[in-house]
Image (spheres, helix red, strand yellow):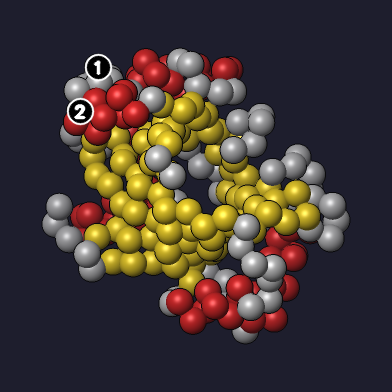
């Protein structure tokens, strides 16, 4: 997560594991391999989703974090941008959140960055309109991360994700997250050149939350 609480990232779908392997062959080896278990929260009528907010509890390597994200700004060019706040959560509290016996919203008031976290907490509370915010679904994500310094000196993290939404749906994705405040155009050009070298078309990806909900509705859940 960026220090200023603004997530800037390019998200592209891959057709299969072969496309993933073709891209990885052009890059340094992954520095981190992670298994992420994600639990989403919403009201019963999906009020947060309709308002563009995301609230997620993630387990990664035995550690838990609660993350809130605001509505996404997706320009025709450049990275998708959205506000983001996060905090670590003790395992005992995470167990209550998973069981639906703890309210995740008060925890956001102590997330970072503080200003972004407080604004997101208040906006999500308004969107929920006093309805309980409870676990609404889960998915698993296996991630390979490659920290990069792009040719212009911009720091970024390239992530290869294999996301299992349900027993029938697995998707492959590339995320390039910009961790500096520099201009995004050179990063976009670098990513386009990488895909061109691998012979893979670029396919814009929606957020995992949006895709999870699309699969849930398609499966009648």
52 w.r.t. 93: above or below: below
Residue to which mark 1 is pinned: 130
**Does the CB distance between marks 2 and 1 fall below 8 Å?**
no
Question: Residue 166 falls in which quadrant of the image?
Answer: bottom left
Q: Residue at x 43, y 36 (%)?
A: 63
Q: CA distance from mark 2 to mark 1?
A: 16 Å
Drawn side of residue 157 relative to residue 204, left or right: right
Residue 53 is marked as none
The extreme front residue here reads 62
Given residues 39 and 121, the one toward you in this image is 39
Between marks 2 and 1 in the image, the one whose residue lies nearer the viewer = 2
Q: Residue at x 50, y 29 (%)?
A: 86
Q: Residue at x 42, y 64 (%)?
A: 162
185 w.r.t. 48: above or below: below
Q: Residue at x 59, y 23 (%)?
A: 113
Q: Is residue 86 visible?
A: yes
Question: Residue 90 falls in which quadrant of the image?
Answer: top left
The extreme right residue here reads 152
**Secondary element type, mark 1:** loop
Drawn side of residue 120 relative to residue 183, left or right: left
Drawn side of residue 219 relative to residue 145, left or right: left
> Residue 70, image x and y in percent?
48, 34
> Residue 148, image x and y in percent?
73, 56
Residue to which mark 2 is pinned: 100
52 w.r.t. 18: above or below: above
**Secondary element type, mark 2:** loop
Q: Is residue 133 visible?
A: no
Quarter of the image for the N terminus: give it. Answer: top right
> Residue 84, image x and y in percent?
53, 33
Instruction: Indicate which disc, 2 or 1, sits on the residue closer to the N terminus.
Output: 2
């Amino acid at each position: 997560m960026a220090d200023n609480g603004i997530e800037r990232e390019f998200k592209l779908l891959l057709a299969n594991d072969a496309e993933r392997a073709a891209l990885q062959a052009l890059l340094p080896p992954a520095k981190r391999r992670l298994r992420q278990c994600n639990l989403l929260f919403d009201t019963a009528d999906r009020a947060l989703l309709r308002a563009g907010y995301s609230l997620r509890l993630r387990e990664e390597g035995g550690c838990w974090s609660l993350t809130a994200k605001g509505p996404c700004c997706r320009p025709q060019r450049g990275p998708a941008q959205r506000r983001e706040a996060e905090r670590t959560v003790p395992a005992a509290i995470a167990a209550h959140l998973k069981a639906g016996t703890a309210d995740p919203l008060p925890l956001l008031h102590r997330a970072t960055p503080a200003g972004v976290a407080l604004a997101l907490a208040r906006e999500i509370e308004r969107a929920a309109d006093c309805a309980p915010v409870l676990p609404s679904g889960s998915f698993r994500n296996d991630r390979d991360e490659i920290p990069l310094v792009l040719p212009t000196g911009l720091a970024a993290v390239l992530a290869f994700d294999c996301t299992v939404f349900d027993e029938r749906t697995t998707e492959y994705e590339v995320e390039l997250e910009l961790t500096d405040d520099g201009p995004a155009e050179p990063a976009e050009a670098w990513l386009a050149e990488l895909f061109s070298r691998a012979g893979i078309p670029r396919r814009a990806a929606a957020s995992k939350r949006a895709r999870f909900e699309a699969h849930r509705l398609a499966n009648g859940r």
